[in-house]
Image (spheres, grey):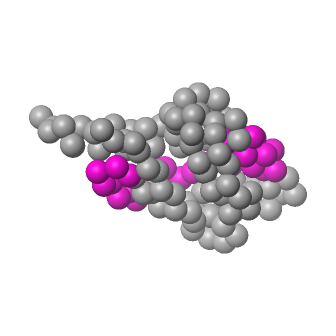
Amino acid sequence: MLDTQDASQSQMLEAVEQYFIRGDAGRADALDLFTDDVRLYFPKFGIAKGKRAFGELASGLRGSLSEFGHDLSSFRYVVTRDAVVVEGSTRGADRSGNRWSGAKPPAAAFAASFNFATG
């Protein structure tokens, strides 16, 4: 049986995994995993504050690509009391047909930090 802290960390990890699964599938309910005051930084687009801005950023990013996904099997996680950090790789193609896969350039590798409100 998991203690309370382990259960909480498992729930945080599950939320992060669901974000990538839902996001890659283009599901709008990926935003349901976040609070209304979510903040996201994406190097090409800057900072998005709030679910609406997050959705607009995601739509803009997906619109610039013909194909996109995360290689979930490549993910490495670090889970702390109130955060999950994930490192992994992506695959896809832009609208010009330029493809990438795995940890090969141009920008296939990524890291993301998810901070959770606790208590």
Q: Is 103 or 43 nearer to us in this picture?
A: 43
Residue that protrudes farthest toward the bottom in the picture: 105
- Viewer can see residue 30: no
- Residue 38: horizontal and vertical position, in percent? 57, 42
Quadrant occupied by the C terminus: top left
Q: Is 11 or 75 nearer to us in this picture?
A: 11
- Which residue does the image show at 71% across and 58% down from the upper left? 46
Q: Is residue 52 magenta?
A: no
Q: Is 90 or 29 nearer to us in this picture?
A: 29
**Magenta-highlighted residues:** 54-83
- Which residue does the image show at 53% across and 53% down from the upper left? 71
Residue that protrudes farthest toward the left in the picture: 1
| Relative to 5, residue 71 above or below | below
- Residue 116: horizontal and vertical position, in percent? 41, 45
Q: Is residue 79 magenta?
A: yes
- Which residue does the image show at 64% across and 36% down from the upper left? 51
| Relative to 86, residue 48 above or below | above
